[in-house]
Image (tube, rainbow, N blue to C red):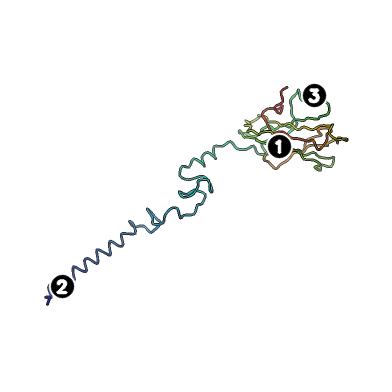
């Protein structure tokens, strides 16, 4: 039979062991943090992407990856597209063209010009929107694209880009006199009306991509 002294010693030792076990169990959750904080107990691959990227998915899934931060910086440093409010649209001021350099039998060619009137460099790229108008201002024909490759044109303040608008007068039996052209800069939605480009067979109305300068890339 155990003495009271030995029994008391055994009980004290058991209590101490239980206390140590309890402290160890509490410490397994991390140093003072709840699951998911600090080192965390939730794998990062289970966190839904929110436009900052994640280690488990493609960086292009929903926005620039936050791992390097280079995607957002590259976007911020990209030359902005020319807004409609930064462009003055008109027929070209090229003197040779205005003196009839493009005049020829069975065709009517016009050059539309875009001038950067803003205060900073912007880029224009692609095909302008071109529509032929009747005397009432109604669209009667939209120009088809020529199919040429497009390239960015960087416009400093005051710099110029232009595009050729071509048609012929021999592919139809009765060319129409077009009262005006409705012109929209590439990738924009605000249009401006220009004066009559002359007579044309509407089905031949074609627009070419914007290029640097005021001569639509035509060697003069």
Q: Earlier in the sequence, mark 3 or mark 2?
A: 2
| Badge 2 element | helix
Picture residue at 84% right of the left edge, 42% below the top: 136
Q: Image quarter for residue 14?
A: bottom left
The residues tagged by marks 1 and 3 sit, at their Cα atoms, a distance apart of 23 Å
What is the count of numbered marks? 3
Q: Residue furthest right?
A: 174
| Badge 3 element | loop
Q: Image quarter for residue 126?
A: top right
Q: Earlier in the sequence, mark 1 or mark 3?
A: 3
Q: Which mark is residue 128?
A: 1
- Above or below, comparing residue 16 to residue 196 in the picture: below
Left or right of residue 22, residue 126 in this image: right
Q: Image quarter for residue 183?
A: top right
Q: Position of residue 58 (x, y in %)?
A: 50, 47
Q: Position of residue 34 (x, y in %)?
A: 38, 59
- Answer whether labels 1 and 2 touch (C-beta < 8 Å): no
Return the residue nearer the eye: 153 or 207.
207
Please name the residue that numbered disc 2 is placed on.
8
Please name the residue that numbered disc 3 is placed on.
100
């Amino acid at each position: 039979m155990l003495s009271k002294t030995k029994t008391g010693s055994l009980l004290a030792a058991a209590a101490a062991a239980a206390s140590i076990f309890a402290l160890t169990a509490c410490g397994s959750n991390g140093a003072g943090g709840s699951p998911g904080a600090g080192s965390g107990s939730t794998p990062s691959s289970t966190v839904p992407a929110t436009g900052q990227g994640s280690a488990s998915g493609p960086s292009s899934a929903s926005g620039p990856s936050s791992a390097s931060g280079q995607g957002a910086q590259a976007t911020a440093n990209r030359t902005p597209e020319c807004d409609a409010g930064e462009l003055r649209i008109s027929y070209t001021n090229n003197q040779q063209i205005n003196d009839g350099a493009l005049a020829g039998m069975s065709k009517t060619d016009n050059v539309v010009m875009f001038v950067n009137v803003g205060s900073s460099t912007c880029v224009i790229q692609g095909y302008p929107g071109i529509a032929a108008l009747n005397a009432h201002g109604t669209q009667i024909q939209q120009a088809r694209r020529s199919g040429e490759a497009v390239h960015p044109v960087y416009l400093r303040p005051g710099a110029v880009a232009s595009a050729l608008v071509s048609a012929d007068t021999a592919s139809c039996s009765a060319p129409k006199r077009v009262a005006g052209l409705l012109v929209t800069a590439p990738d924009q939605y605000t249009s401006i009306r220009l004066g009559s480009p002359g007579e044309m067979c509407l089905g031949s109305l074609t627009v070419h991509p914007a290029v640097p300068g005021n001569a639509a890339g035509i060697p003069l």
